[in-house]
Amino acid sequence: MIPRKTLPSPRPRTKAKRYLAAVGGFAIVLLLAAVLVAYTGDPITKHLAMNVAETYANETYPDSDIKAVEASAQHWFRYEVLLESEQSADTFFSVYVACGKVAGDSYDETVGNCGNTWNRIMLQLTDDVDAALSAAGVSHAGYGLYHDNYLSNTGEVPVPAEGHPLLTVDMPYDKGNLPPVALVLDLEVPEGTDDPEAAVWEFVQQVKSAMDAAGIDIAAYQVTFRGADGSELYASPLIAAGDVPAAP
């Protein structure tokens, strides 16, 4: 009978080794937790970021009673804090806080430049324009509403502003007294069109009549005719509403 070869029993761990292993494991857990908190945030730093943002906003933009309403974590203890005013429906913006210090805000583009106000007015105006075009039976492939400037193929073109109020924060929506707004439409060129320019003027007359009937104060119009494949066939210049003759 061949004797079995016995393996030496493993050496027992010493207390020191067990202690080092435990410390190392705990350190790894702490490191992972710190990285997770740095990327996803935690209630304490989130609350501090909201306080910092709210204090900064009220000191920088006084007389609006601005409150921090929520904060979203970014990375390495950075937060985007959303603030809004209890006195102004259009005053809401973000403050960016990094490691407890303000790194910037979005006030100028959202509030100062009336971005929030225009977005609110545009949503309401879109509903009214949709209804007016539908009521007049005007078919199109899509349209856009532009305030102040229309971006054409050759660059920005100012929307005629004469007779229209300036866009201001918290400006009430009044479709009959709008800030300068251009209505820009796309549609497939009508069949049998030999003179696209003349056809555009006829279409603009039809659209303006629809807006006038609905009491919508559009400042200018632009129309692009496209082929069946979507390619551009003719694009009109920006036509001021005052230059559009009444429809026959």
Image (cartoon, grey):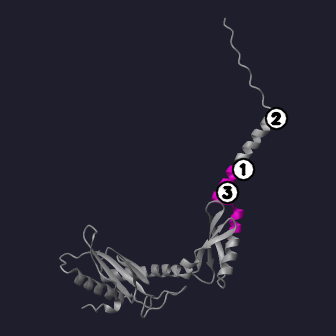
Magenta highlight on residue 35: yes
Residue 93 occupies quadrant = bottom right
Q: Which residue is mark 3?
A: 37
Residue 127 visible in the picture: no
Q: Is residue 159 magenta?
A: no
Tell me which amino acid carries mark 1: Leu
Picture quarter with the C terminus: bottom left
Vertical comparison of 217 with 127: above or below: below
Prevailing secondary structure class for the magenta stretch in the rendered image: helix
Residue 99 coordinates in the image, percent (x, y):
68, 64
Q: Identify the mark nearer the N-term, 2 or 1.
A: 2
Q: Mark 2 and mark 3: span between their CA atoms? A: 33 Å
**Front-most of 84 and 131?**
84
- Residue at (36%, 83%) from the top-left corner? 132
* Pick the front one: 212 or 239: 239
- Residue placed under numbered mark 2 in the picture: 15
**Residue 50 percent location from the top left of the image:** 68, 70
* Horizontal side, residue 55 vs residue 196: left or right: right
Q: Residue at x 66, y 7 (%)?
A: 2
Q: Which residues are magenta?
A: 30-49
Residue type at mark 3 is Val
